[in-house]
Image (cartoon, rainbow, N blue to C red):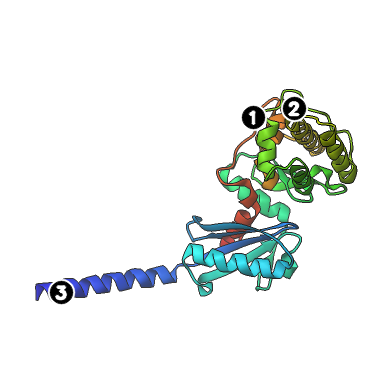
Amino acid sequence: MILFLKIYCSRKYFKSISYWRLKLTYYVGLDAGSVYCKLVIIDEEKNIKAKLVKSIEGSPNNTSKQIFKEGLKDANIKKKHITKIISLGRNRKKIPYKTTQESEILMIASGATHFIPELKTIVDLGALTNKAIKLNDEGEVIDYVINDKCASGSGIFLELVSKALEMDSIDELGEKAALSKNPIAITSQCSIFAESEVIYLVNEGKDELDIAAGVSNSIANRIYSQLKRVQMEKEIALTGGVANNIQIKNRLEERLGFKLKDVPINPIYIAAFGAALSALEK
């Protein structure tokens, strides 16, 4: 009899746990950018249950389907458990799900200030654009500057340079650049001319470390100019995929004269995380 009661109670316990788990709700931020699609799933306690990034090769529609399916699998949940999806990014209108579209600027601010409430300025470094965002004491956006006139200050340009230098990623480009002793200045302001300049330097037999450093420093200098345009204040963080380039960060800190704040997750996910937070809070 005692054994029967133990088994019965155990079954009731696990059933209640399963029921409770299924009643939990989850929230999704889907950042469908120009080159990469990023997804973050959080629970009601704002814990990250899944985060993924995929290169958009061909159709943004198919890429968003794939990353959503993989995200559900990683989080060990089903689509019916998702309460709300907020989307952003250049390809947000091509996402094949019912989503609420939000401003990329606001989602970046939401994600970054969740981790660092005292932030006053954010620089988001994306595939096509760099954004300098100024915040007030409450973490609200009060000004921003977007530089998208030329891709030579963006992630796409860095990827082209990485390939020209036979490096695997923007991250590796930054790591190699940090080892340079004599950075070579890159003078071209246009991405096409700048890429040609890099290829010329490679053909001339210049040290790839010095070329990588010159390219990274050039982008850091442009970011510094953007920061001045929004009248930056201390407590600055970098977000976006290009923020993983260590030399850009080092050079920018050198220009600023103080250390930047570090977000505790890969900065490429900050906008998607902010979108997931907004899905939960609205």
Alpha-carbon span between mark 1 and mark 2:
10 Å
- Residue type, numbered disc 1: Lys
The image shows residue 87 at horizontal and vertical percentages of 67, 63
**Contact flag, marks 2 and 3 (Cβ < 8 Å):** no
Please rate how many residues cluster around mark 2, counting C-alpha atoms within 10 Å: few if below 14, some from 14 to 19, many from 20.
Answer: few
Seen in the image, is 10 located left or right of residue 198? left
Residue 185 in view in this figure: yes
**146 vs 91, nearest the viewer:** 91
The image shows residue 203 at horizontal and vertical percentages of 84, 36
**4 vs 217, nearest the viewer:** 217
**159 vs 218, nearest the viewer:** 159
Please tell me which residue is depicted at 49% across the width and 67% down the height of the picture: 25
Q: Badge 2 is on which residue?
A: 255
- Residue type, numbered disc 3: Leu
Q: Badge 1 is on which residue?
A: 259
Q: Earlier in the sequence, mark 2 or mark 3?
A: 3
Single out the residue that lies furthest toward the left. 1
Q: Quadrant of residue 201?
A: top right
Q: Determine the secondary structure under disc 1.
A: loop
- Residue type, numbered disc 2: Arg
Which label sits on residue 5? 3
214 versus 46 height, above or below: above
**Contact flag, marks 3 and 1 (Cβ < 8 Å):** no
Q: Quadrant of residue 208?
A: top right
